[in-house]
Image (spheres, grey):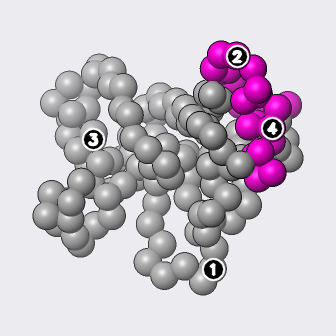
Amino acid sequence: SPYSEHDGDISRDEWMAQTLLAVFQKEPSAKILIIVGGLHILKKLEWEEYVPNKKLSIRQYIERQKPDLKMWSVGQLINENPDGCDFTKRFSSLPDAVALDLDKRYRGWKLGLIGPAAIVPAECFELLDGLIVY
C-alpha cells in the first residue's frame, strides 16, 4: 500500500496488523486468509544491528495484541537461485509444486527468500511454518 494509505508514521506491516486486528475486534471468530509477499509473511523480523528504524513483522504486531490468535505463515519460492536456497536446489526440479511443513528436519537449510534481507540469521522453521517450492 502507498504511504498515503497507512499514514507514513508506521510501517506497512504495522498498518496491515492494525487492519487485521480491527477485523478481530468486530468479529473475534473471524478466519482470514491473507496473501502478502516477501518479508511480510515472516513470523519474526530480527534486524541486523546496523539497520535503522527496525520494525516488527505483521505477525509480531498481532501477537502483541492477541497472543492466543492462531496464525500460520506459508512462503513460496519461485526460481530462487539454487546456490542460495537449499529448497530450490532440492525440490524445484520436480514436475509439480512441493508443499512442506517446515520443522527441525530442515535445520541448517538455506532459505533463498531471506538471502538479501538484513535480518539476523535464523532457521527456516523459525521464520515460516510452511513453504511451497515451484
Q: Is residue 92 above or below residue 45?
A: above
Answer with mark 2 or mark 4, whichever residue precedes in sequence: 4
Within-10-Å neighbours for mark 1: few <14, some 14–19, many 20+: few
| Secondary element at image label 3 | helix
Q: Amino acid at mark 2?
A: Pro
Q: Name the side, left or right, on which 52 lies relative to 15.
A: right
Alpha-carbon span between mark 2 and mark 1: 41 Å
Residue highlighted by disc 1: 49
For image coordinates 29% across by 48% down, the residue present is: 16
Within-10-Å neighbours for mark 2: few <14, some 14–19, many 20+: few
Residue highlighted by disc 4: 89
Alpha-carbon span between mark 1 and mark 3: 29 Å
Say which of 41 and 99 sits in front: 99
Residue highlighted by disc 3: 21
**Closer mark to the observer between disc 2 and disc 4:** 2
Residue 65 position in % (x across, y down): 36, 47
| Secondary element at image label 4 | helix
- Could you tell me which quadrant the C terminus lies in? top right
Alpha-carbon span between mark 2 and mark 4: 14 Å
